[in-house]
Amino acid sequence: MFTLPIYQLQTLNMLPALRRIHIFAVLALSGLYLLTSSIALADNDLAYQLKYRLELLPGTDQALVNITLDNNGKLIRSLSFQNLPGLYTEIQANGDLSVTETDVRWVPPKAKATLSLKVKVTRERNPGEFGAMMTKEWALFRGDDIFPAVKADFVDGAHAVATLDVILPPNWTSIETGWPRIKGNTFRIDNPNRKFDRPTGWMIAGTLGTRRAKVSKTAISVSAPKGSQMRRMDVLTFFKFVWPELNQAFEKTPRKLLIVGMGDPMWRGGLSASNSLFLHADRPVVSENGTSPLLHELTHMITRIHGVKTAQTNDDWIAEGLAEFYSFELLYRAGGMSKERRKNIIKKLSKWGKNVKHLRSQQSTGAFTARAVVLLDELDREIRRRSKNKASIDNVTRDLMAKRTVSLDDLKQSVEALIGPDAETLRSPLLK
């Protein structure tokens, strides 16, 4: 029985379903069984190849980035990289390249177009604490900080078949990203939320220790430099335990998840990205106060909820409050704590945030987040009571996930759709 080679099947799977059916029909009728990526792309006039190449240079604490696109009849008219000159150096390209103090504009040639630049990898988040770092043995960073943000002007309907190739220094053994691995150190970049695919999210490279598991439909990797105190198996075991509740609450989980970690001098906290998250090696899976830093960041990663910020108000308390709420609520639902312990968590959070008078006026950190959790817990109980347990805060969260950037009005509308107007909890003076 004839089968296509793996790399040809991967190329074919990048195409729309009707296009795949058409290609198989043509191959069957013609008796031709060779299919290359170039033939597949030629069959789609609005597709272009976008290739990222990343070379890590630990001797200079820099990364060399190359962006190549075939432009397929000049589907890309121009690319603008805002604030690029201040962060990147040695910017070069064929075609028409314009570099000013504030941005870079590139008009690629019709044929093969290439742009290259260098960027410093290590970044200090707080004095003595780093949000990204490269040493002689490893590198830990976010793709968002390496690959520049792009505003693209292109033909309507144009879309990329994008890949990332990583070149490692000698003696470095592996690279992990939140993107699907095609082969070796090549990854498929497909971000439906972006018009111009970009390799975002956490990445780690070097001499690594990595544990992997399949939890439900999600392939999970936990990776840290060898010698790190990152508790890889603790994380995987914890996810096996709590994942069914996470699935039920959000009804949406990633196909691939990367958790990276390292101890000092990395920043002593957790940070989420679109397909991955960072957790300092000293941070516990579950804190002594009963909340889980890991579930907090995972909630951010899956829900992608952010609060609307204006000159007068800041509704990021919604995102931070939900993340902290689910950081113990999912553990409770999974049987990881008693009802009494959950009550004690709410009690302590209420005490911590007792002096907070307004949730919308300042950045949601510390006591503000604690007070937001208490309010959201009250809202959850009101929704359950008025809907006779047919709905909960989960329904609201899933609704807000579809909007991503949300305000208090969005929260009110979602709640009203479930239980009607005049939600008592949302009349709180905290929200004025």
Image: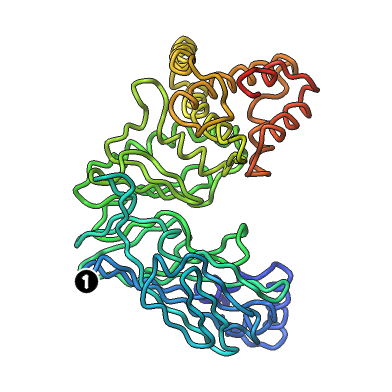
Quarter of the rendering occupied by the N terminus: bottom right
10 Å crowding of disc 1: few (<14), some (14-19), many (20+): few
Which residue is at the far right? Answer: 420
Q: Amino acid at mark 1?
A: Pro
Q: Which residue is mark 1?
A: 170
Residue at the image point whose x is 52% and y is 42% from the top: 216
Residue 228 drawn at (x, y percent): 22, 46
For residue 257, above or below residue 27: above
Q: Quadrant of residue 66?
A: bottom left
Question: Is 171 placed left or right of 291 in the picture?
Answer: left
Nearer to the camera, 321 or 279: 321
Callout 1: SS? loop
Residue 176 drawn at (x, y percent): 37, 58
Residue at the image point whose x is 41% and y is 74% from the top: 53
Residue at the image point whose x is 64% and y is 16% from the top: 381
Nearer to the camera, 431 or 164: 431
Q: Quadrant of residue 90?
A: bottom left
For residue 49, above or below residue 253: below
Quarter of the rendering occupied by the C terminus: top right
For residue 47, above or below residue 389: below
Q: Quadrant of residue 352?
A: top left
Question: Is 374 placed left or right of 209 in the picture?
Answer: right
Residue 220 drawn at (x, y percent): 43, 48
